[in-house]
Image (cartoon, coloured by chain):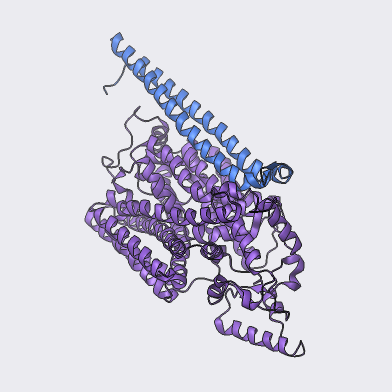
């Protein structure tokens, strides 16, 4: 069977499974729709959280990024796992004890302020939309490569699928499909890497394999990579703090991602779905356990992929190039502009003039065809006519292959069986769909619950709210799909923005809400606005308006840390000067701090406002 | 639960305060370890640690890409177990105080 036949089989089977699970778990009330009836066992919630958290970016792009960054790629690994420690220790058990539906709900009730609720609501919407756009794009890319349909058709199929199972089953349906999606994505991720590790180092456990010797040599894989990279003008793979990734930026970016992770609404809301506080703590553990399965494997994928890229391309002539290169060249994610010797040379920044491997990035097909034609003319006339395409591409910062192809292409590089390659496609789709559905639910609950029910029409009936939730998901899916078809050209900056905002807004407000009983509405709102204002203006300024990185040389990715500190400092300084929260709010803090069973927990059914 | 006589309510409130203090202490200790493993070994000391090797891995690199994640997982495990123990101990203490109050009437 061909790769394409296998891909049709796997995606068909998994899609059928997701729809079946959603149909089995369809819901009729808001409790089921928003928090799955609060009956999800810790270990299953851990799996669902893992699938919710691991997006198309984790599955498709992260290993590729690590592959190019080497040591500095660790910021993503540490950042996106370390956040779960903060979440499990500082937020999840308390927010579960509080027991409402959403994050803006906690902020609004704890600080008794509609402004605080509104600011939290807008942040939740911004973060979720930013994220979901990337997921839809991921669906499109996988469809385009493996099923050879148009990217836009792929996005449309993904939209239809998410729409059906998210509106049908709400959080309950999403939980069960996410559990299935976790297993699809983790098997799809791990199986090829195990095969590659075995092939390359004779060691089936990839985490050990990446530290072992390359088959039939006495050189460890990482040492070999360091050597290759040194020779070709890259910085060493394992060397710390090179180029723009100096110590302060690695530190701040890792910390901003950690804190941002702990503040992401679609992850927090998953902890509302479990039975009790104890289960919330344990689902924090299980979530990281299941996430670590992928995150401990990703650095191995990255190192193996790096090795294969050099091994299969360096010094090859056009006739010798492997099949995977031919397949991916069609997508423009990797292209070769020869210098005239007929042999491919992929080299790094220190030998930039020798590099012949590029990607087309945001260039249109016509633009790149022009560059390629002029380059050919330049070659044919031996430099007297045409333009050296390599210089053009270097000036456009398009050196080297696109990071997004590595996970999808590595099984092909290692010449694994067709069914394994197809499995990876199904895994990529599972990762994108599971995250998209979780985010769409946050968007829907933010609008239908926080905005409509809690702020605009408190007298709305259960049926009205449920109908609005379903409609909102429909509208949100369409908007997300439009973003997927016409992706904003600045996705990576926008994602940095999402984490920076989550770090600078939600995290301090939530922590102070739980651990600082005296903090009232004014310090919280002013702190949040300071954090958001600083972070947003610094990111916009450095990315679009040419500011220098005046704040200790910290780049936009790590600036959320400073925003978070400002938020904490402002809120803590204002706290003694402003009125304390009402007795009601203080009693609420006492209640969420009490251990389970000591007093009546906040029961959502009995609470009058629900 | 009927309202308890005030001495018992006071000692239960004191037990709650003790519970909260132990909770905060455990959380702070684990957060310090979190910072040490992730931001310390993975970032701040990574260049220094890279001179040592763990099998084929430079140590700083290993912490950044493997060790920190294993450490984080262990920390949440210790927290869940530790808080479970704290919860059980607290529940026993409260039950004892309630019985004393009940027996004294």
Q: Is residue A114 visible?
A: yes
Please give left or right for residue A572 compared with residue A287 in the image: right
A293 or A522: nearer the viewer: A293
Residue A448 in the image: above or below residue A292: below
Q: Where is residue A90 shown, x and y percent of the image?
A: 49, 39
Residue A473 visible in this rendered orientation of the protein: no
* Residue A469 screen position, x and y as percent: 30, 59
| Image coords of residue A572 (percent x, y) | 56, 41
In the picture, measured across the screen, residue A371 lies left or right of residue A475, that is: right
Number of on-image labels? 0
Corner quadrant of residue A332? bottom right
Direction front: furthest residue:
A216
Which of the 4 quarters of the picture holds residue B86?
A: top left
- Work out whether B42 lies above or below A8: above
Looking at the colours in the rendered structure, which chain would you say is drawn in purple? A
**Colour used to depict chain B in the structure image:** blue
Q: Residue at x 30, y 38 (%)?
A: A603
Residue A503 drawn at (x, y percent): 54, 50
> In the rendered view, does A276 fall on the left or right side of A575?
left
Residue drawn at x 43%, y 63% is A419
Quadrant showing the N terminus of chain A:
bottom left
Q: Residue at x 64, y 78 (%)?
A: A318
Q: Which residue appears at 53% of the width and 77% of the height?
A: A330
- Of residues A579 and A531, the one drawn nearer to the viewer in this rendering: A531
């Amino acid at each position: 069977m061909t790769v394409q036949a296998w891909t049709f089989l796997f995606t068909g089977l998994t899609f059928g499974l997701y729809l079946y699970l959603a149909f089995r778990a369809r819901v009729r009330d808001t409790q089921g729709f928003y928090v799955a009836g609060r009956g999800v066992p810790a270990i299953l919630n851990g799996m669902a959280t893992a699938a919710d958290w691991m997006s198309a970016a984790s599955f498709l792009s992260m290993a590729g990024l690590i592959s190019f960054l080497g040591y500095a790629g660790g910021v993503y690994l540490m950042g996106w796992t370390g956040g779960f420690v903060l979440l499990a220790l500082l937020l999840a058990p308390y927010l579960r004890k509080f027991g409402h539906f959403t994050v803006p709900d906690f902020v609004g009730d704890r600080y008794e302020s509609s402004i605080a609720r509104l600011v939290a609501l807008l942040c939740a919407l911004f973060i979720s939309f930013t994220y979901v756009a990337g997921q839809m794009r991921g669906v499109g890319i996988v469809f385009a490569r493996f099923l050879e349909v148009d990217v836009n058709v792929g996005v449309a199929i993904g939209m239809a699928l998410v729409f059906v199972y998210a509106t049908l089953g709400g959080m309950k349906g999403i939980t069960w499909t996410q559990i299935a999606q976790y297993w699809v994505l983790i098997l799809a991720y791990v199986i090829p890497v195990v095969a590659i590790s075995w092939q390359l180092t004779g060691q089936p456990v990839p985490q050990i394999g990446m530290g072992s010797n390359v088959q039939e040599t006495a050189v460890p894989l990482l040492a070999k990579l360091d050597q290759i990279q040194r020779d070709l003008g890259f910085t060493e793979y394992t060397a710390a703090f090179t180029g723009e990734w100096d110590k302060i930026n690695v530190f701040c970016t890792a910390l901003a991602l950690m804190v941002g992770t702990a503040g992401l609404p679609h992850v927090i809301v998953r902890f509302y779905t479990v039975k009790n506080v104890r289960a919330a703590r344990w689902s924090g553990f299980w979530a990281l356990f299941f996430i670590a399965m992928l995150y401990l494997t990703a650095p191995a994928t990255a190192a193996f992929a790096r090795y294969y890229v050099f091994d299969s391309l360096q010094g090859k002539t056009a006739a010798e190039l492997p099949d995977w290169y031919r397949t991916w060249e069609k997508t423009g994610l990797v292209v070769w502009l020869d210098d005239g010797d007929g042999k491919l040379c992929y080299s790094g920044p220190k030998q930039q003039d020798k590099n012949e491997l590029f990607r087309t990035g945001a260039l249109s097909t016509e633009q790149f065809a022009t560059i390629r034609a002029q380059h050919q003319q330049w070659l044919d006339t031996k430099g007297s006519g045409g333009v050296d395409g390599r210089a053009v591409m270097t000036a456009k910062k398009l050196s080297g292959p696109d990071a997004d192809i590595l996970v999808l292409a590595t099984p092909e590089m290692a010449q694994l069986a067709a069914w394994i390659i197809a499995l990876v496609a199904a895994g990529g789709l599972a990762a994108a769909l599971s995250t998209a559905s979780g985010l769409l639910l946050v968007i829907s609950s933010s609008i239908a619950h926080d905005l409509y029910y809690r702020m605009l029409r408190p007298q709305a009936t259960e049926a009205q709210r449920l109908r609005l939730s379903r409609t909102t998901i429909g509208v949100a899916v369409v908007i997300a799909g439009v973003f997927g078809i016409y992706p904003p050209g600045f996705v990576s900056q926008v994602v940095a923005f999402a984490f920076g905002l989550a770090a600078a807004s939600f995290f301090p407000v939530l922590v102070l809400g739980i651990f600082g009983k005296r903090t009232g509405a004014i310090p919280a709102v002013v702190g949040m606005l300071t954090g958001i204002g600083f972070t947003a203006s610094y990111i916009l300024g450095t990315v679009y308006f040419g500011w220098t990185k005046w704040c200790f040389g910290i780049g936009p990715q790590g600036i959320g840390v400073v925003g978070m500190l400002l938020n904490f400092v402002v809120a803590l300084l204002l706290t003694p000067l402003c009125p304390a929260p009402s007795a009601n709010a203080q009693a609420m803090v006492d209640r969420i701090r009490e251990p389970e069973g000591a007093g009546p927990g906040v029961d959502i059914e009995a609470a009058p406002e629900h | 639960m009927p309202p308890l006589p005030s001495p018992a309510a006071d000692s239960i409130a004191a037990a709650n305060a003790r519970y909260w203090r132990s909770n905060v202490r455990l959380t702070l200790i684990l957060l310090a370890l979190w910072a040490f493993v992730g931001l310390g070994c993975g970032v701040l000391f990574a260049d220094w640690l890279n001179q040592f090797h763990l099998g084929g891995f430079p140590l700083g690199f290993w912490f950044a890409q493997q060790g920190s994640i294993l450490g984080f997982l262990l920390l949440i495990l210790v927290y869940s177990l530790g808080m479970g123990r704290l919860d059980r101990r607290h529940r026993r203490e409260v039950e004892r105080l309630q019985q004393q109050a009940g027996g004294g009437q």
